[in-house]
Amino acid sequence: FLLALLRKDSAHALTSCSSTLHYARVLTQRSPLRSITVMASAPIPLQPRDSRCYCSSRTSHHTAGSNLTLWKHHALTRRQLLCREMSTSSDNERKNDDEDREDTGLIHTSTPPVMMLGNILPFFGKLGAGIGVLGVGLLGLLYLRQGDLLYIPSIDVIGRDNSQNPRGYRSPAEYGVPFEPHLIESTDGVAVHSWLLLHPDSIERKLPTIIFFHGNAGNIGVRVPNAVELYKLEANVLQVEYRGYGESTPEHIKPTERGIKSDAEAVLRFASNHPSIDASRIFLFGRSLGGAVTFHVADYAAKNDMPLAGMIVENTFESIGHMVDVLLPFLSPFKNILLRNQWDSTSLAEHLKTPILYIAGDQDEIVPYTQMRDLYSKSSKGSILHRFHRVEGGTHNETWLQGGRAYWNAIKTFLKEAVEASSRSSLKK
């Protein structure tokens, strides 16, 4: 059965009813249709001519407690429908119309049923055109505003500045860790805000320095507890927040892939020239989007013959295109023309010789675990040292909290092995 629910004051009531009958006609030609049920507050849903052409009989029932009446039109069989279409004449139709108008008082229109399809096709044509225009508009909006979807400097009720964070997430000073605040200038004049958590006498003690590239949302303050734990591994930690994030200036500059890459390159140059940092023991650490930044900086270091001891990536992705396939699969056919942000790590992983540690939570709800495995497989072709640490039950942002002591041991062991591997590689050159 078909059900049409109409209001008597609706300007589209008759159109809706005609559409219902059109579908009834199509369905009846393909398979048996038992009835058409119409609910309305006035006797407008079915024209007399339509009743003869589509229905064998009609019953009505007034619903208790309301002003609605149900009209049930028992549909013709396929054979009855075809016979009536062939035998109906215009003269008989006009005569019977007049009789039905007098008996039922139903609203009547002179549009014959055979014209119904011709009336509906233009409607669906306009509807299709409207959907097409809307689709193009949405794609255009995604193209222009995709940066706002990917880069999120403020999260929830937390503001952009670190001072607006809850207690414990505002500064390393809250943990009694000595640090230096820096504004590192990028090539286009943007000043990237950073905190250098620095051990005393780190050069003399030959301590490693870890450059921490964060994910796509929030400032470096929300990563302070994580940075402090890395600091406890007897490593300096340089926390960096990209342009458009935290206290980087100017504030109106928005983050882009090109801009963030430029910022990250400037940070590596800064660390390599810092008097309290051993340039031969610099490591990169990146989580999520930060992992893609890490791959780029490692490639930049290799191309510019800059020393780099190793890199650690956690729950990162192969590329933005791969993530579109996962999170927005309906956009996959358009991604080649739609994406302005690529962050393609797959093209870099198999060529980098830098020692690399992959840390992956196998229950990552955002980046599929398989993407980390695929990147690791590519790294095994070129990296002089490649390690993979799986955190059972680890989720996207909480793996470092869920990995337990094994998580920190994996990083500490890798720092030592990577320095040794890099030293051997340098001696061979």
Image (cartoon, rainbow, N blue to C red):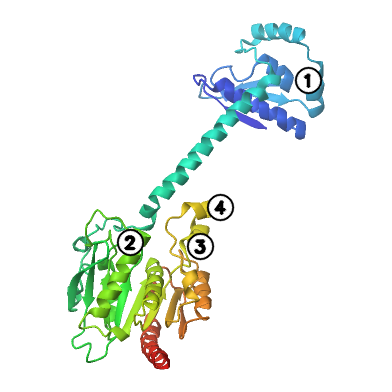
Q: CA distance from mark 3 to mark 4?
A: 12 Å
The CA distance from mark 3 to mark 1 is: 55 Å
Residue 168, x across and y down, in percent: 22, 69
Q: Mark 3 belongs to which amino acid?
A: His
Q: Mark 2 or mark 3, which is nearer the start of the sequence?
A: 2
> Looking at this view, is 394 or 128 the one in front?
128
Q: Residue under label 3, please give it.
A: 322
Using the image, tell me which numbered label, if any, was put on residue 333: 4
Q: Is residue 379 above or below residue 258?
A: below
Q: Which mark is residue 259?
A: 2
Describe the element under mark 1 as helix, strand or loop: helix
Give the alpha-carbon distance from disc 1 to disc 2, as whole Å: 70 Å
Q: Amino acid at mark 2?
A: Gly
| Disc 1/disc 4 C-alpha distance (Å) | 45 Å
Q: Earlier in the sequence, mark 1 or mark 2?
A: 1
Mark 3 and 1 residues: CB-CB less than 8 Å, in contact?
no
Image coordinates for residue 27, horizontal then vertical, percent: 72, 32
Answer whether residue 299 is visible to the viewer in this image. yes
Q: How many marks?
A: 4
Residue 151 higher or lower than 29, as above or below: below
Q: Quadrant of the C terminus?
A: bottom left
Q: CA distance from mark 3 to mark 2?
A: 22 Å
Residue under the point 66% across and 23% down: 118
Residue position for label 1: 85
> Which residue appears at 38% of the width and 49% of the height?
145
The kind of residue on which mark 4 rests is Pro
Circles 3 and 4, Cβ within 8 Å, touching? The answer is: no
In the image, 85 versus 413, the foreground residue is: 413
Mark 3 vs mark 1, foreground winner is: 3
Foreground pick, 19 / 97: 19
Q: Secondary structure at mark 2?
A: helix
Residue 167 appears at what percent x and percent y? 20, 67
